[in-house]
Image (cartoon, grey):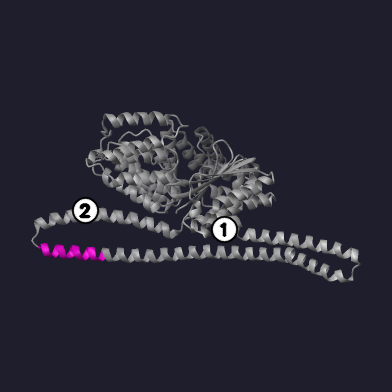
Amino acid sequence: MRILLFLSFLMVFIHSNAQNRDEIVDVGPEFKALFNEFDSCIEDEEQNCIELLNQIIEKGKQEKVPFLDYLYFKKAFYFKGRQELDSSMVYAQLAIDHPNPEERQRRDLSSFNLLATGYQVKGDLNTALDYHLKNVAILEDGGNPLHLGYTYSNIALLLGETGNQDKYIEYLLKSYKLLDENNDDTFIATIASNLAGAYHSNGKDTVNVNKWARKTIELSELYNDKGAKARGWMYLALIEEDIENSLEYAGKAVKFSNKTGKKSIMSSTYYVYAHTLSKIGRDEEALEYAAQAVDFAQEVGNNSSLLRASYMAGSIFFKFGRKEKAADYFHTYAALKESISSAENAKEINEIQTKYETEKKEKRIAEQELKIQKQRSNLLLAILGGVLLISILGGAIFYNKRKQQVKLKQLQQEKENAILNSFILGEERERKRISQDLHDGVAAMIGAAKMSLESIPYLPREKQLEQFSKVKDILENTHADVRHIAHNLLPTVLEKEGLIKATSHFASEINETKLVKISVTDKNSNAQELSPQLQLMLFRVIQELVNNIIKHSQAENAEIAFSNSPNGLQIEISDDGIGYEDINNTGNQGLYSITKRLKSIGGNFKITKGKSGGTQAKVVVTV
């Protein structure tokens, strides 16, 4: 089985030392004092310093300072540190849109890097690569060679994700050369380990894998890089033909990955060790490491490790006859397999890189033509040749762009059809449920009332009144059932008073059951101004998440909070239960359905384990 290995992104933030960029921005004594106060604030991790930063930015806007890009960048970097990528990307773009008039004082390099990081995490490799190339255009023109080497590495790894192995290796070698020439002691071991992985993926070139894996171990010992050392031993384990040696190398990889404490590395080394154990028939030990690899990958969101580790764990559980547990792992594997980016998206990224390389070559051709024009008299012929070349290239680019637009439109249509089919199936299931409720409940009780009424004329006088009383009770129960069915279709309080009141009413009903205590808060969210259809969808999402809390969380308390965010309406549902892992294993299908529904209306859904336990689900809908 071909083993896909993870990619190690550097994402080094470039603050200074590039061409025409000063290390320190001159903000003057007044703003410097404000930033000293802000720096003191963020040293306290429990303190929210955003209000102070907003005041600094507002002051800068009012005074029309030239370093407004620096103020926006500080806010973008603050959000990045708090893992709020969307907000970080918004303010990084604002920094680029408001450049300092003095080029040396600009923060564009750092802002481009923040945007590249954000888009890479979101899976938009196309845009991430574009921002890295913007940095390369500045750094190649006399910038800091180490920062250029770091950027080359990030570009290489993006290309590696698209399957462009030749360019992947080419950029890694360029990165390693610059770092080696400039005595880098921070990332050079990581670059060497990535080269070992690149050659392993590129047809399993064992000679180069062995060369770079051992170079990785040598450099990691020199610079005490335990993560790189773990990867070096891991690649040696993958190419070693002697199974005992392979097991020894894989064990060393696990040992050093444990020392790093980084679960992104541990997920891959544990998988390789499990894979090696399985090859020699030690399935029980292999299962233990494969299961841990799954847990680590889930915690850090490493989908490539999670994909292969869940498949291995499922296969071993199935072999042991534990089919229910095997089905859980295979379900995780199938869901991830379905979400992997298509080959067409990878092709688009490769075309961007090709376009960039073509533009560089065209620039060199143009410079050469200029020299030729000074030496020769056939200026007109050279111009006509250049125009013809540009026309051909332009036609080819236009054709390829149109072709990709058609394919993208086709993929979008297929996505919309899939979403529509899921809604239709949901409606059909709801119709069947309503039909069954009416048939088994309401219709049966009305039939009973009818037969009771028909029997009254044949009963003695004293029994007739008793029969009337029974009919009355039957009709009252039927009336209550009809109201309950109608309430499930469209809650009356939702229709009359809106989402907040309906949620509060729903919470009070749950509280009466004593299963969990739910509180509802509204921080001027204006949720009632949404369309009735959108309010109903959000109400169903809230019901599904509350049902998950009741079924799986073992929580005693929960909170539903409505508020506004920079992107629209935000709904946070938190509890004090056992945490995210249990929810992920048992409620996956429901959460997947919620994600698809919200995406269909441009919404966003995220569920995480709380810092002090429990689970927090966050729903954001653009309004």
| Residue 254, x across and y down, in percent | 54, 37
Q: Nearer the viewer, residue 389 or 122?
A: 122
> Does 389 lie within the magenta span?
yes
Of the numbered discs in the image, which one, if any, rests on residue 20?
none
Q: Amino acid at mark 1?
A: Glu
Q: Which residue ends up furthest to the left in the rendered image?
A: 377
- Identify residue for label 1: 495
Viewport quadrant of the C terminus: bottom left
Whether residue 179 can be seen here: no
> What residue did someone put label 2 on?
364
Lower position in the chain sequence, tag 1 or tag 2: 2
Can residue 325 be seen in the rendering of this structure?
Answer: yes
Amino acid under disc 2: Arg
Q: Position of residue 502 (x, y in %)?
A: 58, 52
The stretch of residues the image draws in magenta is 378-392
Question: In the rendered view, would you say 241 is above or below 486?
Answer: above
